[in-house]
Image (spheres, grey):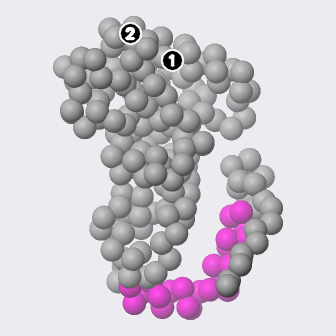
Amino acid sequence: MNTLPILKNVLQTFADLELAVLVGRQENEEATTASDWDSALRWKNNVDRLLILQQTEVLKQGIADAMHIHKGQIDFIDMTQARLAMRAVIVEEGVILKGEDTLAWSHFLTQTWYATGVFSSRKLENATYDSVAFRFVAANEHPDHDTLNTFRKRFLKDIEGLMVQVLLIAHALGVAKLGNVALDGS
């Protein structure tokens, strides 16, 4: 039985849910009838936390009813709180159930990409072949490392200004926090 359409239908009824990604055994077809249904969720930023808790329980019951499974077999991961290793699993192995072509998904991929600490032009080039997140941000293109390096050198000042603008917009939207970062180069 193909369960993805059933899950997608349940998720579409939750307007405040931005992203939902199926991860774990259910997505990679290693599941048994006793396997958990693990999904990573991201709710809209402007939703009250108490309402999110309530909606999460309603969602869990809705999935249990639709899939004819026990509610205890459903686990949710908060995408906003996930650490880098979990974020990588979500991006690389997950099946997107809701929000694939949205700014929220693009933001999640970009945030995961930068969090990996890959800055070498050769590593960036390789990542556009190996990583879904890098491939998405690169629009499924595979720029040569020389091209990436030349681009960075040529547009460094412009990129710095754009990054400041992006950070200010992200802060205004509530998707980023601004503060001080100290680096020790020793």
Distance between mark 1 and mark 2 Cα atoms:
13 Å
Where does residue 156 sit, x and y in percent of width and height?
62, 86
Figure quadrant of residue 134: bottom left
Q: In the rendering, which numbered label is found on residue 59?
A: 1
* Residue 146 relative to residue 111: left or right: left
Which quadrant of the figure contains the C terminus? Answer: bottom right
| Camera sees residue 18 | no
Instruction: Give the mark, 1 or 2, whose residue is nearer the N terminus.
Output: 1
**What residue appears at the point 33 percent right and 46 percent down from the top-left corner?**
93
71 is within the stretch colored magenta: no
Question: In the image, what residue type sits under mark 2?
Answer: His
Please name the predominant secondary structure of the magenta segment in the image. Answer: helix
**What residue appears at the point 34 percent right and 39 percent down from the top-left corner?**
95
Whether residue 96 is situated above or below residue 143 in the rendered picture: above
The number of numbered discs placed on residues in the rendered structure image is: 2
Q: In the rendering, which numbered label is found on residue 70?
A: 2
* Residue 184 relative to residue 134: left or right: right
Whether residue 83 is situated above or below residue 47 in the rendered picture: below
